[in-house]
Amino acid sequence: MKVNKHKNFQLIEDEKDNVAEFGAFLEYIIPKEFSSENVVIDLLKYNQMTLPELLNFLIVSNKHRATKKSFVIINDAIDPDVIPEELIVVPTLQEAKDVIDLEEIERDLGF
């Protein structure tokens, strides 16, 4: 796992090539190490990613977002129309930053 600290989020990348294993690892590590921070998961290297592989991140996403922190995935391989609305998946890092900024504003306004 590779972690890069940004202004208002942590960018996490998989250093191995097993998306299911990475999803399971994040379920363990996110609550322990990143519970108080917004998180962006960079999955761009998985350019052949399937919906079942993406769903490995659904549980950790739901749990992290329940703590009023953002959880955004970067990937452009999956058709946005088939992604469950519980997951926030964007194609670029800039869009992930924009999502986090918007969610921060919403939380500040009490939404």
Image (cartoon, grey):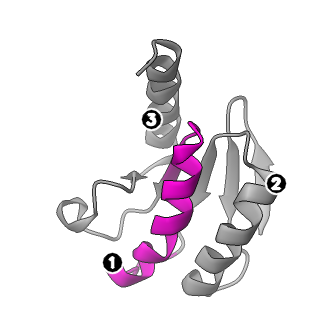
Quadrant where the C terminus is found in the figure: top left
Placement of 37 over or under 26, stated as above or below: above
Could you say where residue 88 lies in the image, as x and y percent from the top left? 40, 51
Task: Residue lying at the far right in this picture: please name it.
Answer: 33
In this orientation, which residue lies closer to the viewer: 82 or 108?
A: 108
Helix, strand or loop under label 3: helix
Q: Residue at x 77, y 69 (%)?
A: 1
The answer to if 54 sits in the magenta stretch is yes
Q: Residue at x 52, y 33 (%)?
A: 100
Q: Which residue corresponds to mark 2?
A: 33
| Snapshot quadrant of residue 3 | bottom right
Asked if one can make out residue 14 in the rendered structure from this viewpoint, the answer is no
Could you say where residue 18 lies in the image, as x and y percent from the top left? 61, 87
Q: Along the horizontal axis of the image, is 93 left or right of 6?
A: left
Q: CA distance from mark 2 to mark 1?
A: 27 Å
- On residue 51, which mark appears? 1
Asked if disc 3 and disc 1 are in contact, CB closer than 8 Å, the reply is no
Magenta extent: 46-72
Helix, strand or loop under label 2: helix
